[in-house]
Amino acid sequence: MLLLGSAVAAECLVVDRLRRESGTVLAVLEADYLSATRAAYGTVARDYARLLAGALDRIPWDRAVLALFAGLARDRLGPVVDAGCGPGRITGHLHHLGLDVSGIDLSPGMLAVARQALPGLRFAVGSMTALDLPDASLGGLVAWYSLIHIRPVDVPAVLAELSRVLVPGGQLLLAFQVGDECRHLEQGYGHAISLDAHRMQPDSSPTS
Ligand SMILES: C[S@@+](CC[C@H](N)C(=O)[O-])C[C@H]1O[C@@H](n2cnc3c(N)ncnc32)[C@H](O)[C@@H]1O
């Protein structure tokens, strides 16, 4: 499921305020599920990239939505970030569509793959729970199947964090699977992992 819309104002995480005051606080307060997600994607990074290579070529709907997003975000309001970029396949696609785009991901292993594949683009380790970006600094932000790894109770605060970094009228593109359940994965991309993936409803913010 894909959602495309303008940023809305909301409050930010308390932990985000703490992060700004002390870089060490984030490490202390990081939720276990973020550490587990980082570990899982570190394990699968190379095989994830191999198995997803060319997937966009086979999904015209995804390409159409990304083209619409690029058309709305291009040139007008500032750079674009691909949050939860993984191996950079969406980052690279948006770059080819003419956007000034960089990638952020929780997993250094995923970013190593992205940097190798796309040496001309910028990638940085970071979490969408507390982006190391100034307020109102982006014209657009994409979270393509990355919000699915945020604990449902944290999703409203993360959406507020994404809103914080967008300029008024900035474009937000979210991709996720629709549903109500959490899937706990013990296997993925040919590896043993421990990873939670949450489905969401497009017309409501999960809170539990
Ligand atoms: C299913 S992959 C999608 C990767 C990429 N967007 C794509 O479509 O190929 C989910 C990605 O989100 C990243 N991720 C999960 N939680 C994150 C967080 N809190 N902040 C940043 N990245 C996160 C993971 O490390 C992983 O690379």
Image: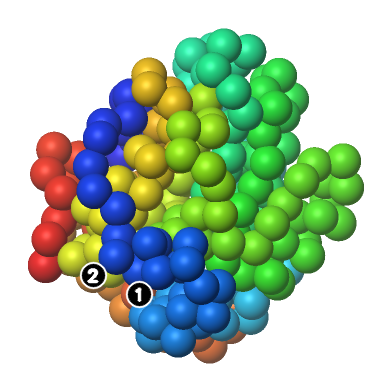
Residue 65 in view: no
Disc 2 target residue: 182
User: Does mark 1's beta carbon lie closer than 8 Å to ligand 1?
Assistant: no
Relative to 100, residue 42 above or below: below
Nearer to me, 174 or 133: 133
Report how far apart the C-alphas of labels 1 and 2 lie in the structure: 7 Å
Q: Residue at x 59, y 23 (%)?
A: 78
Horizontal and vertical percent position of residue 157: 26, 55
Asked if disc 1 and disc 2 are in contact, CB closer than 8 Å, the reply is: yes
Q: Amino acid at mark 1?
A: Asp
Horizontal and vertical percent position of residue 46: 73, 68
User: Does mark 2's beta carbon lie closer than 8 Å to ligand 1?
Assistant: no
The tag on residue 196 is 1
Nearer to me, 44 or 141: 141
Horizontal and vertical percent position of residue 94: 65, 29
Relative to 201, residue 50 above or below: below
The tag on residue 208 is none
Which of the 4 quarters of the picture holds residue 1?
top left
Q: Specify whether 188 is left or right of 175.
A: right
Q: Residue at x 69, y 57 (%)?
A: 124
Q: Amino acid at mark 2?
A: Cys
